Amino acid sequence: MSTHDDHRTGEDGLDPHPSAPRELLILYATETGTAQETADRIARECRRVRFHCRVQSMDAYPPETLISEHLVIFVVSTTGWGAEPRAMTSLWNMLLRSDLPDDLFEDMCFCVFGLGDTAYEKFCWPAKKLSRRMQSLGGYEICSRGEGDEQHRLGVDGALDPWVELLLETLIQLYPLPHEQDNIPAGRPPPRVSLSNLESGTSLSPDPLDEDKKFHTASVKCNRRITAEDWFQDVRHFEFSFEDSIKYNPGDVAVIHPSAAASEVDSFLATMGWENAADDLFTVEHTMLDQTLPDHLPRIVSLRILFTRYLDFNAVPRRSFFQLLRYFATDELEREKLDEFVSIEGADEMYDYCQRVKRTIWEVLSEFRSARIPREYVFDLFPPLRPREFSIASSIEFHPRELHLCVAIVRYRTKLKIPRKGVCTSYLSGLTPGDALRIGLRKGFISLPTDPNIPVMCVGPGTGIAPMRAVIQQRIHEGYNNTTLYFGCRSAHKDQHYHSEWESHAEEQKLRYRVACSRDGPEGVKRTYVQDLMQKDAQDIWNMLGQQRGILIISGSSNKMPTAVREAVRSAVERFGGRSNVEAVEYVAAMEREGRLIEECWS
């Protein structure tokens, strides 16, 4: 537990506030939606000790009003390379201002729960930095920071459950309940919405997505497969045109709201016994304001509309799903199994049943057939069908009023040999020229140098090439010819994305192009990856990144590749920069601090 001596007035080290209002703010920053679900869960638990919570995304919260809050819980996810989520950027930049006094938040109590993955070096890095920064500005951290690990058999819930209990104990100490009140016992929570049926013939309300100024109407210009037809992976090149004069920079991302396939929605509704009422319209009133609802949700919907655009029945359920499902199962054996899943002793069995094999909510409900879910609880049991983000693969200078994407269509089989398809990439793959959709634009993490003498080195295997294509096009447009691309694929003839473009630019001496085709070598010979090419080019690497103070941008899957690329750079610094191993490691770390090493990677 954090200690601030000026707050330690009680025997237990906590300063009780019996007269303070029982209100708190939960601010979350999410990339995939897990932090939002976690924030909702914390808010529900805080009800047990009679706290009224407000739950907001950090990018929707005015940073300047934070000083007026007296109790805040931060729930922060982590990007693959340890950077803060995009939703946190505005608030974080405000907190980093050098002119802020060190007692700015002296009247605030706070705590932090981070979400991350111990497979990566910078586990829960944004949460750790936020905790330290809030303390340095006078905030009082009321309980130790929680850190949820996706590698745990229960995911982030493995750390969340005990942390929430610690939080509630701390809140009771800081804010004692009046004598006439007790904790609210755990039980079935009320639904977060109330629904009212509408008469047939009622018109739908306007689509909030159409009215969101951050989104623009796009028309599909091109949907072309760029891997060989006989290749196992289907990678597409998309081109979208806009009537609006859109603006974006290399590294920015496109935000797309998918729709589930109509045939899947029909089958799911039939599984639930809702097919006869699927198109009945009703209004949605948000009643439990400490719980969030899907983005851009209209007030008038039907079950078919909800499960096509707003709720995800193909998500892998978390423990909280089973905790709520218990209340709706009528079969005694099914209730016993659900009770077992949510018990401490049943954690391994729930993991084997659900998370390990990626069993979906739809599949779970197909097996627990006695569960009769009231319509008003659909927002509590089904997570939002979230928008997906894709790195933009074009420069607006090269392609005015256009936006290009390079997307791998997600198809795989689970450990149960059940075929799976990505909701959004399946939606995209079905688009044809002339189709219209709304696309949002969000700022990315890449910042290019304005000095023409500073070289840029891009490392982008696979679909990591997307933001690199935007970078290369932008630099060629600006007349720079000191850009290097390291691209990695399996086969030169099957999945060397955009190779004709790179070869043409290289022939015109506008780009230095190096490609590693890992499966094209002779049988038994060690495979060559981008990091191997960089090891061979160590002297050039040092010349560009050391002597010329160049920029290194890494994009692609956040598996072993980014670490191996960093190691290749470290080796070049040691071999040709005259540094020791320790000094070379620090040099690479300094590149990152200075913004000269940028990772745009995903899991």
Image: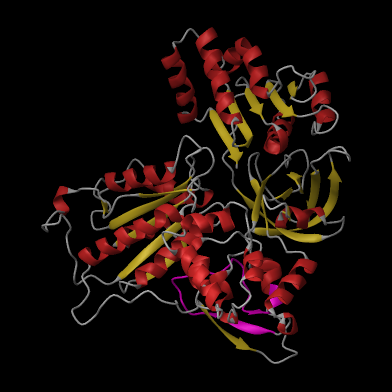
Magenta stretch, main secondary structure class: loop
Residue drawn 70% across and 44% down?
A: 392
Highlighted magenta segment, given as a residue range: 281-305
Where is 43 relative to 114, above or below?
below
Q: Nearer the viewer, residue 276 or 273?
A: 273
User: Relative to 283, is 496 on the left or the right?
Assistant: right
Residue 399's image quarter?
A: top right
Q: Nearer the viewer, residue 454 or 167?
A: 167
User: Relative to 183, is 562 on the left or the right?
Assistant: right
Where is 594 relative to 195, above or below?
above
Q: Nearer the viewer, residue 558 or 340?
A: 340
Residue 264's image quarter?
A: bottom right
Q: Is residue 59 visible?
A: no
Residue 445: x percent and y percent? Answer: 56, 40
Residue 282: x percent and y percent? Answer: 64, 84
Residue drawn 53% across and 55% down?
A: 351
Residue extending farthest to the front is: 333
Q: Is residue 442 magenta?
A: no
Residue 192: x percent and y percent? Answer: 50, 76
Residue 285's image quarter?
A: bottom right
